[in-house]
Image (tube, rainbow, N blue to C red):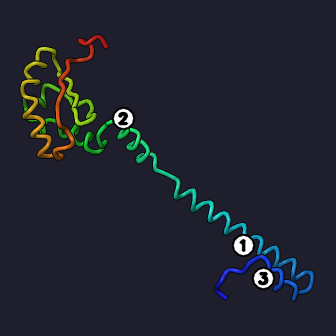
């Protein structure tokens, strides 16, 4: 029989056995029911579980912070993607709501890099897609900004 038995069907079947066999089969059936319940609870928990990485991505997305993998790649390949003028004089900090925050190595470079921001957006779009970075904000080093 491949179908699942109801508790009444089990009781009816157990009536045909003597006391010891009936108790043993009843215990086995109850153990099986407990295991089924555990499996169902575990399946529900597994459905409800979210990986830590997915949770962080979700939180960051709700804050407007871009995909961490692309930010990491941008950081790792900054000199290559940004070119020599940007790569040697600045570092990418974060991408939020399409805006890339870049920290210049020297406060005197901020104006020069801001002037070239549109070209940087185009280079990043070629590598990562248009929606990743839509604007660039250049700031000086933190010790110069009073952080």
In terms of depth relative to the viewer, which is nearer, 88 or 59? 59
> In this rendering, is residue 93 above or below 51?
above
Q: Is label 1 in a helix, a strand or a loop?
A: helix
Residue at left offset 68%, top offset 80%:
4
**Label 1 CA crowd tier, 10 Å (few <14, some 14–19, many 20+):** few
Q: Nearer the viewer, mark 2 or mark 1?
A: 2
Q: Are marks 3 and 1 in contact (CB under 8 Å)?
A: no
Q: Position of residue 15 (x, y in %)?
A: 88, 85
Q: Quadrant of residue 98?
A: top left
Q: Which residue is mark 1?
A: 32
Q: Secondary structure at mark 2?
A: loop
Q: Quadrant of the N terminus?
A: bottom right
Side of 49 where 133 appears, left or right: left
Is residue 77 shown above or below 117? below
In the picture of the structure, the residue carrying the numbered disc 2 is: 63
Residue 63 lies in quadrant: top left
Q: Residues within 10 Å of mark 2 (few under 14, many from 20)?
A: few
Q: Identify the residue shown where x is 51% and y is 53%.
A: 49
Q: CA distance from mark 2 to mark 1?
A: 47 Å
Q: Secondary structure at mark 3?
A: helix
User: Percent position (x, y) of residue 110?
Assistant: 13, 19
User: Looking at this view, is 119 or 82 the one in front?
Assistant: 119
- Give the residue number, with chain letter if any, for mark 3: 9
Mark 3, other Cα within 10 Å: few <14 / some 14–19 / many ≥20:
few
Pointer 2 or 3: first along the chain: 3
- For the view shown, which residue lies furthest in the right direction? 19
């Amino acid at each position: 029989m491949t179908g699942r038995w109801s508790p009444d069907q089990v009781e009816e079947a157990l009536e045909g056995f003597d006391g010891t066999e009936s108790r043993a089969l009843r215990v086995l059936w109850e153990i099986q029911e407990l295991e089924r319940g555990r499996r169902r609870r575990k399946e529900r928990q597994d459905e409800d579980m979210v990986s830590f990485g997915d949770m962080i991505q979700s939180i960051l997305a709700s804050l407007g912070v871009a995909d961490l993998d692309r930010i990491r790649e941008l950081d790792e390949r900054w000199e290559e993607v940004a070119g020599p003028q940007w790569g040697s004089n600045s570092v990418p900090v974060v991408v939020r709501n399409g805006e890339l925050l870049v920290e210049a190595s020297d406060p005197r470079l901020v104006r020069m890099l801001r002037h070239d921001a549109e070209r940087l957006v185009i280079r990043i779009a070629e590598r990562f897609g248009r929606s990743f970075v839509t604007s660039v904000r250049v700031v000086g080093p933190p010790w110069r900004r009073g952080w």
